[in-house]
Amino acid sequence: MKQRGVYVLGAVMAVVLAFSGCRKQQAHQVDQPQRAKLVQGAKLISVLNPQRADSLVLMAYKQGDYQRMLTLTDSLSARGELNELRTRGYRATAYRGMKDMKAAIASLRRAIEVEDVSDNDYFLMVHLKTLYAELQQLQGNSEGALRTALALIEQLRSDGYEDSEFCQRLYSVLGESQLNLDHPDEAAKYFERMYGILQKSIRNDSVGDHLMEGVEALGNVTSTYLANEQWDQAELWVDRLDSVFTLCRGTRYAADYPTYVDWYLASVKLSRALIAEVHGQQAKALQYYKEFQTTDFSKSDEGRMTGSSYLLLSHRYDEAAENYVVADRVMDDYGFESNLQMIGNVLMPKLRANYYAGRKDSALRVAMQIADLYDTAYVKQKRDATAEMATIYDVEGKERLIAEREAKISQQRFIGVTIALVILIIAFLIYVWLRHRMAEMRAKQERIDSELRIAREIQMSMVPSKFPKREGLDMYAMMTPAKEVGGDLYGYILQRDKLYFCVGDVSGKGVPASLFMAQVTRLFRTLAAQKMMPDEICTRMNDALSGEDNERCMFVTFFIGLLDIPTGHLIYCNAGHNYPVINVGDDQCAFLKMETNMPIGPMPGMPYVGGEIDSIKGKPLLIYTDGLNEAENNERKLFGNERMLDILRKSKAGNARELIESLAAEVEQHREGAEPSDDLTMMAIYLK
C-alpha cells in the first residue's frame, strides 16, 4: 500500500497546482469580451476598497498583463499613491502571475512584516497572510505554514472573525500541514472546522461564489488525503466535494468560469478512480478514469501528469512515462524551486514510470536529475526551517516550546526522507550500472561462446568423421572434448594399401591446446603424405614444434602407426602416449609392449625409435587417450586400466564402432554426472 501511495504523489502535485490557493490563470482567447479571473484574484479585489491608483493596477491584473502590473505598482508607489502594504501585496500578486514563486513569496513575507496597518487595509493584510500560509504549504514548508496559520487564526478569533472565509482557508492549511507532519487526528479536527464554516457560507449562496470556494477547499482536502494514503478519509471528502460541486455547477458563477468547472470535474473523477483502484475495483476505476479523460483539463500538461497517478496504480507504465515527458515544462511554468516535496511528488514517480516501462536510459536521466537537484533542495529545506523557527513563531514561552518540538520532528522527518531518498537514488544508480555491466558481460560471454562454438566446429572438422571402406578393414574413432575445444586428436591417411593413423593428446585443455592440436594435425598429414616412417614423422614433428617458438613448453603424446592392409604388418612409434591395447587371442587383451619415447615438443633434437608387429590380423587394436582410463566420478575415483581391460575382454562388440560406443557409455556411467576431467579420444582397428 505504501508503494501505491507514492505513485499518487506525482499526480497529486498537479492536482494541488490546479486546486490550491496558488492557481494558474487560464489564458482565454483575446477576442472574448471579458477574461476569466482567478478565485484568489476576486478575493484580493474584494478586500481592497480600491482607489484610482488601485484601479489602474487591478485593470492590468484582470488583463493578465503582469509585467505592466509590476511597472505600474512601482511607478505609483514612487509617487506616493500606493502605501507600502499595497505595493508589496501587488508585487507579490504580479510575481505569482509571472510564475516567479520565489519572488512572490519574498514579496509576501515583506508585506506581512509591514507595521502600522490602517483599518482600511485590515482585511488586505489578513488576505496576504492567509495567502502566505497557503504558499508555504504549497512549497512543502508544512512547519512554516502551520505557524503562520495558527498565529493568524488567533488574531482573527480575538477580533471576532472566527467564522470568516479566512479562517476557513487557514483551517484547510492547518489540516494539510498536520497531515503532512503525520498528525492525522489533528488534521481531521482542523478539516472538520473548515467544513463547518463552509457549510454556513454556502447555505444561502445563490450566486455560487461561496460554493466555488467550497469546491476549492474540499478539493484541497481530498488531494491531501490521497497524497498521504488516507484512502477512507479521501473517499469521505471526495463525496463531500462531489455534493458541493453538484450544487455549484448550476450557478451563474460556474457558467462564467467553465474552466474551473472542468478542473474540479476532473478532480472528482480522478480521485474516485484512484480510490476504486486501491480498493481493487478495477472496472469501476477504469470507468472513472475514462470520465476524467473527457475533461479539457486531462489534455493539458498538468492534466497529463495528474492522470499518471491512475496509470501508475494500474501498471500502465508506458502511458505514464509518456505523460511525464511534460514534467520539466510544468515545473518551469510554475517557477517552483527545487525542494524535497517537488522531487518526491514529481520526479520520483517519473523515475518509476520510466523504469517500469523499460525505458532504462530515460530512468537513468531522471535519477541523475534528482541527484543534481538534491543539494539545492537540501540547502533550501534547511534554510527555510531555520528561518521559520527563529522568527515567525517566537512570541511566548508556550509557543517557543511548540516550535522546538515541531523543529525536532521536522529535523527527524527531513533526515529520514533525505536518507531514504539518497539510498534510493544510489541503489537505483548501482542497479542500473550493474544491469549495464551484466548486459555487457552477457554480450561478451555470448561472443566468446559463439567464437568457441565456431572453434569447436573447426576443430571437429579437422578430425575425420568418415572412415576407409576396404575389404577386411574395420576402423572407427571418436573424440569428445572436455570443454568447448580440446587438445586431443586423431587422424588417418590411406595411400593405396598403406594406412597411416594416429592418436594424440596435447598438454593442457581449452583454446591453447586446440591451437597446438591444429599444428600437430597439419604436420601429421603433411609428413605422412611424404610416405615417411612413423619414427621419422615423430622426429620431424618434434623439430618443428620444439625450440624457441614453443615458449609455453607445450607438448603432445602421440601414437602413430603405418599398417599394410593386405599383410597386417604394423610399423609404429609411440611418443610418450598410453600403450595401446591389443587382443592377443582367446578373448584376452593386453597392453602392447613397446619402446616408448619422449612426447613431441618439449625438447628439440630428440631421436625417436619405432617398433613393428608382423601382423595384427584377427587382433583388434585400441588406441586411446587418458580421458578413458583416468576418467573420474564425483568421488574422484578413476575408471582405471583394469576395468578398461575387463570390459574389452568381455566385450561382445561385433565391430569397431560398437566397441568405441560401448566404452564411451561405460565411462559416462562411471562419471555419474561429474564433469569430464579430460578430453576423451578412442580409435579401434579391426583387420580380418
Image (spheres, helix red, strand yellow):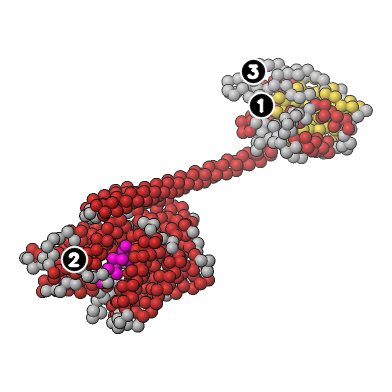
Residue holding disc 2: 125
Horizontal and vertical percent for residue 435?
A: 50, 46
Residue visible at 76% across and 31% down in the picture: 628
Check the image and name the residue furthest to the left.
Answer: 79
The residue to which callout 3 is attached is 604
Relative to the observer, which residue lies in front, 437 or 304? 304
Q: Position of residue 641 (x, y in %)?
A: 80, 26
**Residue 265 picture location, percent across and down:** 39, 74
Residue 557 location in percent, x, y? 71, 24
Q: Please say if 671 is above or below 208.
A: above
Badge 2: how crowded within 10 Å, few (<14), some, or many (20+)? many
Foreground pick, 583 / 11: 11
Label 2 sits on a secondary structure element that is: helix
Q: Secondary structure at mark 3?
A: loop
Closer to the eye: label 3 or 2: 2
Question: How crowded is the residue under tag 3: few (<14 C-alpha within 10 Å), some, or many (20+)?
Answer: some
Instruction: Report if the CB atoms under discs 1 and 2 are less than 8 Å apart.
Output: no
| Residues rendered magenta in the picture | 164-174
Q: Give the label, 3 or 1, closer to the camera.
A: 1
